[in-house]
Amino acid sequence: MALLPVQALILTGPARQLPQHVQRPCAREDRVESLRIPILKIGDILIASIQVNLHDASAVQFKDDLLQKIHDTRAKGVIIDLTALDLVDSFIGRLVADIAAMAGLMGSRVVITGLQPAVAITLVELGLELPRVITALNLEKGLSVLQRLTAESGDGAA
Amino acid sequence: MGQPKSAVIRSDLDIVIARTMARDMARTLGFSAIDQARIATAVSELARNIYLYAGTGTVTCREVEKHGRKGIEIVCEDQGPGIPDIDLVMQDGYTTSRGMGMGLPGAKRLMDDFSIQSQVGVGTKIVLRKWRS
Ligand SMILES: Nc1ncnc2c1ncn2[C@@H]1O[C@H](COP(=O)(O)OP(=O)(O)OP(=O)(O)O)[C@@H](O)[C@H]1O
Ligand SMILES: [Mg+2]
């Protein structure tokens, strides 16, 4: 059963304020390594494809890594491809919305690509329509959306 | 009928284990891909609530049958602080943790049956069911 990747997680700061009684898990920490989602740079666009059954700590790690990379590379656009995800719950949904808002503050546009039909349906039924997140059917369409968006914002020629 | 399966929730990794367990059982029982996603998402929400608000608890999945119809039943139980006002937490957007307040009402929408029992200082038990179409 390929449930979890062999590499597990680095426990970073909690995603939100945890009640005092919640213990951070420690039993597994000794076999913990970093699980980092690779972020590729092509021109002034960053592309990340989420391929694992994400748990919360590695999702938060991804957010931090991505924002840092946007800052370091001054990327104008970001594509987060979710083709391989079979589930987006409220935690991941909120994280994606947060990433889009934070990247926006840094002058970078985020496009989410590849949501599976079952994932899109459950997201809406869950009550998360993510109205402010830009989506595209697949990576190719996502790229053209980004090119248009960054051209419109006036600095596309730079 | 197959054996019930349980997962103990202690960490955020256990949330992944619980929702994968529920999805696997749903698949075995012949639920559609969309229903599998609904079931796994509901379990992810409730397992995370156990982790966040109670610290530890259990998620148990089993096959059920009613009037010749097959389904899956999921029981999420903890001995945490309990919920003082159930009507309030079932409202969209109500949260005590800067979440989105979508977990409980969303899980209810994703499933066919949803019942919640909770007592302050004793714990919370939520039973979910989904019937195969
Ligand atoms: N097992 C539980 N024990 C005690 N309180 C709970 C439990 N589950 C939920 N609650 C309470 O109910 C509230 C609403 O839960 P719900 O899952 O709907 O939203 P949330 O967890 O706050 O945010 P989201 O799930 O959208 O990230 C929580 O903020 C918490 O106060
Ligand atoms: Mg919740």
Image (cartoon, coloured by chain):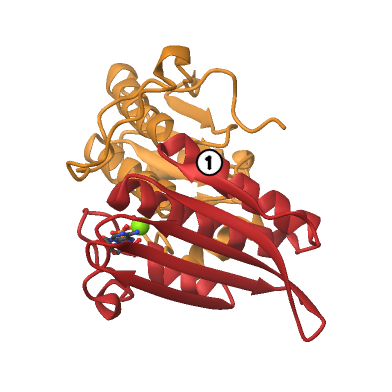
Residue B133 versus residue A156 in the image, above or below: below
Question: Where, quadrant-wise, is the N terminus of chain B in this rendering?
Answer: bottom right
Ligand 2 found in image quarter: bottom left
Counting from the top left corner in percent of width and height, residue A113 is at: 56, 45
The x and y percentages for residue A38 are: 50, 20
In the rendered image of this protein, which colour is used for chain B? red
Q: Can see residue A55?
A: no
- Secondary structure beneath dot 1 equals helix
Image quadrant holding the C terminus of chain B, namely: bottom right
Where residue A106 sits, quadrant-wise, is top left
Of B123 and A18, the residue lying toward us: B123
Residue A152: give x, y in percent of width and height. 37, 45
Image height of A12 relative to A56, above or below: above
Judged left or right of residue A20, residue B107 is right
Q: Name the residue under label 1.
A: B16
Residue at the spot x=36%, y=54% of the render? B49
Query: Quarter-wise, where is residue A117 in the image?
Result: bottom right
| Subunit of label 1 | B
Drawing shade for chain A: orange
